[in-house]
């Protein structure tokens, strides 16, 4: 490394942070300036820049400052710094790939909406992290339910995930078609889709529908109500008329099926 250094204002601008933050890092011993100029300004050399880069990366990963200090303390030379950065780089590339898939997914949805094309549900959620619902699933159905479902999802091959997503897309399409055809939720057509819906739920480990002896009826009826009250799920069954008509149709058909078979 050469002998160049940068002032605290330059580093704050380059790193997208503030001088106040950098002074705080100095106060707690996390990032010490390389030198203090005669005017009192802090200056940082290349080694300090590497350390700051790692601090910001670790912050992005959700670590607090005390945890970051412990991590940095364990890497004290250039070789270990480089190895640690390689680990960070691998994590960043994973995130980059996930974000790229999200961008492509949203771009495809926008193009479909503007072009009046049919939305491909199996492509709409590529890159979105299912673990963001962890707390909600655990609250509704318990930690084991989430753990079983998460293990099942992570254990699938790409082909198996694609097949599962296609199954979800087919169900959504057929529910909407049934709702828009104005058939009765108790009709044979609607009840056939309800049966397939139950088969699908039973195939997901961790759901009450997959556990022998569980209160499947209450689960299915509650799920139908959630489709109506939670717009995140109701959107999957939105008909051309808008509103919650599609979700209400699914709820009613599932209730009829549950009363008759569960």
Image (spheres, rainbow, N blue to C red):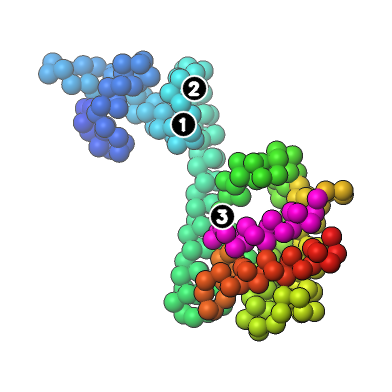
Q: Secondary structure at mark 1?
A: helix
Establish if 258 lies above or below 38: below
Circle 3 residue: 127
> Residue 260, how many percent across, how many down?
84, 67
* Sequence order check, earlier mark of 3 and 2: 2
Give the farthest residue toward the bottom.
Answer: 181
Residue appearing at x 79%, y 74% in the figure: 192
Circle 2 residue: 67
Establish if 156 lies above or below 165: above
Mostly what secondary structure, the magenta segment?
A: helix
Q: Secondary structure at mark 2?
A: helix
Q: CA distance from mark 2 to mark 1?
A: 9 Å
> Residue 92, how many percent across, how many down?
50, 42
Position of the N terminus, as image quadrant, is: top left
The answer to whether mark 2 and mark 1 are in CB contact below 8 A is yes
Q: Is residue 163 visible?
A: no
Circle 1 residue: 58
Residue appearing at x 46%, y 80% in the figure: 115
Other residues around mark 2 within 10 Å, as few (<14) / some (14–19) / many (≥20): few
In the image shown, does 97 or 143 lie closer to the viewer? 143
């Amino acid at each position: 490394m050469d002998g160049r250094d940068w002032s605290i204002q330059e580093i704050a601008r380059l790193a997208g942070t503030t001088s106040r933050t950098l002074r705080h890092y100095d106060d707690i011993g996390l990032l010490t300036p390389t030198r203090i100029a005669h005017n009192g300004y802090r200056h940082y050399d290349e080694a300090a820049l590497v350390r700051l880069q790692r601090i910001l990366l670790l912050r992005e990963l959700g670590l607090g400052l005390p945890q970051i200090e412990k991590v940095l303390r364990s890497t004290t030379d250039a070789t270990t710094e480089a190895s640690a950065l390689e680990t960070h780089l691998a994590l960043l590339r994973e995130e980059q790939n996930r974000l790229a898939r999200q961008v492509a997914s949203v771009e495809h949805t926008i193009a479909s909406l503007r072009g009046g094309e049919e939305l491909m549900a199996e492509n709409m959620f590529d890159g979105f992290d299912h673990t963001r619902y962890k707390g909600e699933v655990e609250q509704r159905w318990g930690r084991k339910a989430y753990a079983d479902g998460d293990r099942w999802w992570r254990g699938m091959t790409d082909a198996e995930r694609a097949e599962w997503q296609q199954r979800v897309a087919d169900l959504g399409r057929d529910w909407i078609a049934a709702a828009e055809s104005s058939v009765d939720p108790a009709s044979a057509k609607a009840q056939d889709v309800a049966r397939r819906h139950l088969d699908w739920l039973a195939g997901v480990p961790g759901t009450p529908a997959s556990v022998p002896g569980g209160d499947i009826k209450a689960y299915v009826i509650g799920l139908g109500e959630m489709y109506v009250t939670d717009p995140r799920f109701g959107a999957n069954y939105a008909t051309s008329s808008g509103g919650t008509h599609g979700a209400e149709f699914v709820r009613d058909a599932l209730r009829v099926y549950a009363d008759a078979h569960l």
